[in-house]
Image: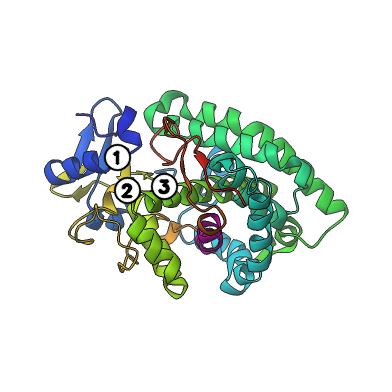
Amino acid sequence: MRTFPAGPELLNPYPFFAEMRRHHPVAFDDGANLWSIYRHADVTAILSDHVNFPTATIDDGGAPPAEWRRLFSLNAFDPPRHTQLRNLAMRAFTASAVARMQDRITAIVNQLIDAVVGTGRTELVADIAGPLPTMVIAEMLGVPASDQESFRRWSDEVGVRANALVLDPENGVRLLSEALTPMEDYVRQQIAERRRRPSDDLVSSLLAAEIDGERLEELDLVAFCMLLLIAGNISTTHMIGNAIRALLKHPDQMARFLANPDQMPGAIEELLRYDSPVLAAPRWVRHDTEVGGKLLKRGQRVIVWLGAANHDPDVFPEPERLDVSRKAARQVSFGHGAHYCMGAPLGRLEARIAIPAILRRMPELRMVEGAELEPVPGYLLHGMVSMPMTFRAS
């Protein structure tokens, strides 16, 4: 049984998810040799259960292998070690730390819009939605502006290769490892430079930070910096692009979105629910566990479909309807449980600033006539490769 959306379905996978959720909520994919999970209750239960469903290894006890740590950083660990590492890293993403970024994010958004606002045309992904999160996270880490384009290119390649971890398990680790190598080399150079000359940036802070009196090992420091650069780049890019696309399709909701800035946080949750920038999350089965009446056995792989959970009518009535006034706090686009995305507050802030600025400063925004949208490759991420658009120049 095919359990993955494919081809044109990747632009709108929700009808496929609805069919699977209705008839095969827990389904085994013979081709991919894994279980697919679609219902909100099952998805959140698995994401909350790191004992039975770990993220990157099924070894019982001990540290995960070095290669898993290199590839997955914090996600290679489960509690309690994951909690220790996460608490250290979260110093950069506290509410106060993120709030301090507001003025800088606003300035970057306006700078990017200024570059195109007089032309009446934009490729939204390349011009705004892509550069914004890259510039923000790179500045936090102290990465020079001249190198930020390289990080976008490396991050995009990692996002594509990550699909092989599930679809091509025999070669997946090698393919992802190859994609990470140029970024890893660069990050190690940056860390070496901060050791010689500490600065007021996140890399220097992580070098000085301690967990129970111990410094981060070099491997984990490098992996964490790569995780930030990748995760802080791709998901926010697609969050902004998907939200703009959804609002343009629903002009009544766009008008309500722009007319009620005090309701913006709730509206962002609904936009995340309606068209998630991350469709799926992989897990392993450590102990035989029953889910939805099916027995998942130790050593098997699982993919939980976040996009399907976000359209579960048992949680979100009329899920195919965009309603920016909806209470969508239970959406799972940023995950759930111990591995909930720690960069979510920063991504939400970037979206709250960028989306209304784009719509207000680019009036009559619309897709270029005849342009065909191309979905990003694979199943983990959900967005468009490019969004060629026109608007009324000012």
Tell me the distance, in whole angstroms, between the alpha carbons under discs 2 and 1: 8 Å
Q: Position of residue 212 (x, y in %)?
A: 63, 67
The amino acid marked with disc number 3 is Arg
Which residue in the protein does label 1 denote? 13
For this rendering, which residue is in front, 312 or 203? Answer: 312
Q: Position of residue 173 (x, y in %)?
A: 50, 30
Q: Position of residue 47 (x, y in %)?
A: 34, 55
As drawn, 153 above or below 74: above
The residue positioned 78% from the left and 47% from the top of the image is 144
Badge 3 or badge 2: first in the primary sequence? 3
Tell me the distance, in whole angstroms, between the alpha carbons under discs 3 and 2: 16 Å
As drawn, 179 above or below 291: above
Dot 2: what SS? helix
As drawn, 100 above or below 153: below
- In the picture, measured across the screen, residue 211 lies left or right of residue 173, that is right
Callout 1 crowding tier (Cα within 10 Å): few <14, some 14–19, many ≥20: many
Which residue in the protein does label 2 denote? 307
Badge 1 or badge 3: first in the primary sequence? 1
For this rendering, which residue is in front, 119 or 191? Answer: 119
As drawn, 14 above or below 46: above
Residues in magenta, as a range: 342-358
The amino acid marked with disc number 1 is Pro
The residue positioned 60% from the left and 51% from the top of the image is 133
Which mark, by number, is residue 245?
3
For this rendering, which residue is in front, 191 or 23? Answer: 23
